[in-house]
Each structure stands twice: as structure tokens, then as C-alpha cells.
Image (tube, helix red, strand yellow):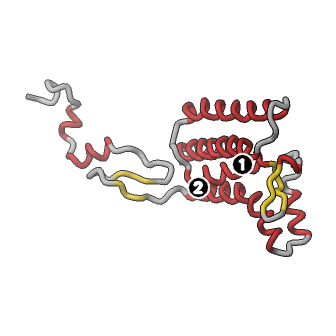
């Protein structure tokens, strides 16, 4: 029986087993893992750009959490005030909606602090690796959840709850970072 009669591609029938396995292996993922022809995974180097972006996002996401901790333990003076002012244009910073760490008020409200923390965690973990088409409804749903939290709070239906503000911000920030990194990893080059 020939390869044509069996319905298989004749070139695939003539290819060595290792080459067929390599052609069928999954492509490298976000962390740069590739597959061996024998099926076992080997670690490949992630792209330098992807690694740099992940580190930058993690550092930026941790910054509003580190500033009050640093200001509570170190005499930062004008530098501490300047670092705090970095976030002044990003957030309303209402005291009743902001957290304090070690007695120092964070430079962002609890929701924005949650978003930054979510970006840091999302950059560190960067999972799941979904296509942007799959991330869109997730991002829309998480945005709607934040809007619902804002609306119920601002309409006076409930007081500001730091737990919900942090949770909705964290979930949204995580999804934004993971989606961005998944999209960046798919870019050619």
C-alpha cells in the first residue's frame, strides 16, 4: 500500500521520524520553551525584549507599594516626596479610598494600587497564554466589574471597601499585563 492510498502526504511518509515529530511539535511559548523532536521540553532563552518588558512591568507595578514602605523606614526627604508625586496625575488619591503601609499613605488609591500590583504579578507569571481574541472578553468583563464597583460605591449603595477595590484592580491589572505580554511574545522577530 502506498502513502497516497493511505491518505497521507507522500512527503510526510518519506520524512524521518525525528523530522515528523519536530514538524508536529508546539511552537515556543511566552517563556521561550521549545520542544525536542523526541517530545521532551527544553528551555530556550526568552527574547531579550520580552524579558526586559517583563522586568520593567514588574518594577513599575511594585513601585507604588515600595514607596510608602521605603518612606517609612528610610529618610528619603525630597526624593520620597518626588517619588510620591509621580503618581499624583494618575489618581484622585482620596485619603478615605487609599491604603496606608507602615503609617504612610500610598501614592495611589486602593483600586489603582491593585491595578499596579496586578500588572506586577501579571508580568511575573504571564499566564495563561491566550490569543488577543480570547483576552478581549476577559478584559471587557473585568472592566465592567470595576465599573460596577465604582457605581455601587459612588451611588452610595455601599461604602468604599478596600478589599473589592484591590480585588477588581488586581484582576484587571493582571489581565492587562498577561494579555500584553502574550501579544508581545507572538510578534515576529
- Number of the front mark, 1 or 2: 1
Q: What crowding class fits label 1: few (fewer than 14 Cα within 10 Å), some (14-19), or many (20 or more)?
A: many
Name the one closer to the observer, 3 or 114. Answer: 114
- Residue 6 x, y percent position in the rendering: 15, 26
Residue at the spot 67% in from the left edge and 46% down from the top edge: 170
- Residue 159 x, y percent position in the rendering: 82, 38
Cα distance between the residues tagged 1 and 2: 15 Å
Image-based side of 45 in relation to 3, left or right: right
- To which quarter of the image does residue 101 belong? bottom right
Disc 2 element:
helix
Mark 1 lies on residue: 114
Q: Which mark is residue 124?
A: 2
- Residue 98 x, y percent position in the rendering: 82, 50
Residue at the spot 18% in from the left edge and 37% down from the top edge: 13
Image-based side of 44 in relation to 114, left or right: left
Image-based side of 168 in relation to 153, left or right: left
Name the one closer to the observer, 177 or 142. Answer: 142
Image quadrant containing the N terminus: top left
Instruction: Please tell me whether residue 42 is drawn above or below residue 77 in the rendered image.
Output: above
Name the one closer to the observer, 101 or 127. Answer: 101
Task: Residue at the far left: name it.
Answer: 1
Amino acid at each position: 500500500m502506498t502513502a497516497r492510498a493511505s491518505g497521507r502526504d507522500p512527503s510526510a511518509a518519506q520524512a524521518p521520524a525525528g523530522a515528523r515529530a519536530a514538524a508536529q511539535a508546539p511552537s515556543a511559548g511566552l517563556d521561550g520553551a521549545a520542544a525536542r523532536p523526541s517530545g521532551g521540553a527544553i528551555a530556550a532563552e526568552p527574547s531579550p525584549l520580552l524579558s526586559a518588558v517583563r522586568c520593567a512591568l514588574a518594577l513599575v507595578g511594585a513601585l507604588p507599594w515600595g514607596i510608602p514602605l521605603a518612606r517609612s523606614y528610610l529618610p528619603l526627604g525630597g526624593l520620597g516626596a518626588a517619588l510620591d508625586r509621580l503618581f499624583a496625575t494618575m489618581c484622585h488619591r482620596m485619603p478615605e479610598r487609599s491604603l496606608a503601609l507602615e503609617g504612610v499613605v500610598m501614592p495611589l488609591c486602593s483600586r489603582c494600587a491593585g491595578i499596579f500590583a496586578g500588572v506586577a504579578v501579571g508580568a511575573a507569571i504571564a499566564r495563561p497564554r491566550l490569543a488577543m481574541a480570547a483576552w478581549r472578553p476577559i478584559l471587557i468583563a473585568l472592566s465592567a466589574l470595576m465599573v460596577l464597583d465604582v457605581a455601587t460605591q459612588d451611588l452610595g449603595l455601599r461604602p468604599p471597601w478596600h478589599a473589592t477595590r484591590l480585588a477588581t484592580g488586581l484582576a484587571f491589572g493582571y489581565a492587562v499585563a498577561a494579555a500584553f505580554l502574550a501579544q508581545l511574545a507572538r510578534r515576529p522577530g
